[in-house]
Amino acid sequence: MTTAKVPEGGRSAPPSDEGYERGLGSRQIQMIAIGGAIGVGLFLGAGKIIEKAGPSLIFLYAIAGVVIFFIMRALGELLLYRPVSGSFAEYAREFLGPYFGYVTGWTYWLMWAVTGMTELTAAAIYINYWWPAVPQWVSALGFLVLLFGVNLISVKIFGELEFWFSMVKVTAIIGMIVIGVGVLTLGFSDAAATASTTNLWSHGGFFPHGIGDSLMTLQGVMFAYLAVELVGVTAGESTNPEKTLPKAINTLPWRIVIFYVGSLIVILSVVRWTEFSDGISPFVAAFGKIGIPLAAGIVNFVVLTAALSSCNSGMYSTGRMLRALAANSEAPKVFGRLSPRRVPAAGIAMSVVVMSVGVVLNYLVPEKAFGYVMSVATAAGIWTWSMILLSHIRYRRAVVAGRLPASSFPAPGGAVCSWLALAFLAFVTVLTALDADARVSLYVGAGWAALLSGGWALSRRRAAAREAAPEFAAGAQ
């Protein structure tokens, strides 16, 4: 694979055929985008946050959703300027420098590798709902092997599986909202006696533990939105990126309103927030309370599907990101090769090996595995989003200065909204530093930064040695 070079006039040339099969159509891109907004952070992680923040979680999801929309519109403007499978890592390389492209690519890979661990952990927890005797690590390992096989076949199989995974999630959440509204308005089911919108403020208030405690849950809120940027990675394999990508990004607001804000308003109205706890999906608990036959089991199947969907996406994205890094001599060359089925099999395999750490965690500390990896994944996600915003700000400056052409999909508010989003992400990072449980992600981040800096210095020395070798040989002759 060759990377786009930057001509003297400014804009990077559109990438040549990167070797991928353009097998993702509009239908699949839309569902990948929708699925990226519905993951284990909502289905499982929300239980812990509700316990800490109460109904104020609705407000937090809404505010964070606005910031996520700013980030995605910034990414959308960059994608239509130059659609490339390396996505934000390539933009960081172009607008911030090679080092930032290198760090962003590897950090996004880490984010998805770690997120894959959380999804495997969540899937194993959901399996325990039906078969509590099955060890969590056994379920996690089985799902890891299954999804690895799917990702090796072809991008079309990946896209089709992700389409149906997302379809299950979307249909189920809409169904849950409809049933919940029916309980509130028609008064059926076992939960009707206590179901009321007054549950949103009558049990300690909207901020039951105070605004400060609610804000301390923002890291978990942001974790729920990880993967919305995945649509950017699909650019290199989309059949018509100029049409499908803007459409997928512009549907983000209503996805947030329905799937996050809407579903939580209904659930927290039907069931008092005090009845939810860490480690239990609020969706499963709510429909168990409603008492509809088999409803809790059906919802558990849906949240299992959500976890597998996210892990499936993680394998897809990490393989592509490693290939982009290899193309820039920032990862071993083996990761730059495509299999006969035109998928980056070596990169996917490397990611699966790292995700298998999640299986080990489920064996050693099954009760803490989810919390450990969630905080690390969120920190990596915040770095990735920050690089998107900074790249967008630099791009807008270049457009205003006339050095680069304007994108056909400009972000509303321009660089101003990107600055606002950056300030919000910085605020979340400060809150993370103040939280004793979440602070571990910053320690891991510091170690990761040191490791990457060492790797960068080594790769630059090797590159310099390769460039000097022909000249040395010529001089020796």
Image (spheres, rainbow, N blue to C red):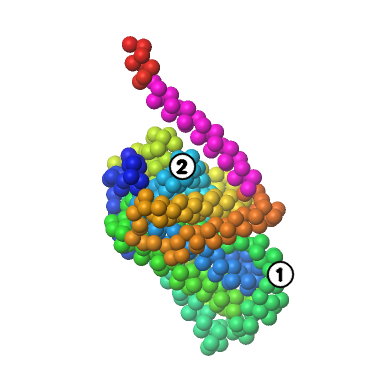
**Residue labelled with disc 1:** 210
Height in image: 334 above or below 139?
above
The answer to whether residue 166 of the structure is visible from this angle is no
- Rendered location of residue 140, percent (x, y): 52, 51
Which residues lie in the magenta part?
A: 442-469
* Quarter occupied by residue 242: bottom left
**Residue labelled with disc 2:** 97
Q: Mark 2 or mark 1: which comes first in sequence?
A: 2
Q: Residue at x 34, y 54 (%)?
A: 405
Residue type pointed to by label 2: Gly
The answer to whether residue 210 of the structure is visible from this angle is yes
* Quarter occupied by residue 61: bottom right
Q: Between marks 2 and 1, how big is the CA–CA gap?
A: 43 Å
Closer to the camera in the image, 24 or 69: 69
Given the current orientation, which residue lies at the most extreme bottom position? 186
- Rendered location of residue 264, percent (x, y): 56, 73
* Quarter occupied by residue 322: top left
